Image (spheres, rainbow, N blue to C red):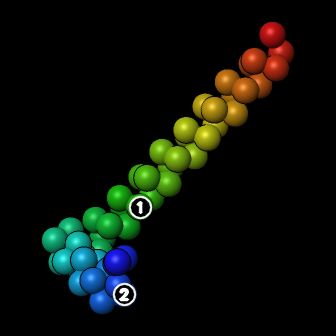
Amino acid sequence: MGISFWQLAIVLLIVILLFGSKRLKTLGSDVGSAIKGFRGAVASDDEREGKS
């Protein structure tokens, strides 16, 4: 038994009501920039290991 569409929609609605759309947009961009930073750090570590 997985999560149905309606359960997911209800959870999404509750999250939007709790945090608001502006806060979710800011949170999404913060998570995106954190992921980009993590990928950049991993790539630079791989680059350093290749040069050694």
Residue 45 vs residue 29, the one in the foreground: 45
Classify residue 28 as left or right of residue 19: right
Could you tell me which quadrant the N terminus lies in?
Answer: bottom left
Residue 46 vs residue 36, the one in the foreground: 46
Sequence-wise, the earlier of marks 1 and 2 is: 2
Residue 20 in view:
no
Q: Is mark 1 on a helix, strand or loop?
A: helix
Query: Which residue is painted at 29% across and 78% down in the image?
Result: 12
Residue 50 place in picture, x, y as percent: 82, 20
Q: Which amino acid does label 2 sit on?
A: Phe
Residue 24 place in picture, x, y as percent: 32, 67
Residue count near mark 2 (Cα–Cα under 10 Å), binned few <14, some 14–19, many ≥20: few
Q: What residue type is labelled 1?
A: Gly
Classify residue 12 as left or right of residue 51: left
Residue tagged by mark 1?
28
Query: Which residue is painted at 43% across and 52% down in the image?
Result: 31
> Considering only vertical position in the picture, is 43 above or below 30?
above
Residue 2 vs residue 26, the one in the foreground: 2
> Considering only vertical position in the picture, is 37 above or below 10?
above
Question: Image quarter for residue 39?
Answer: top right
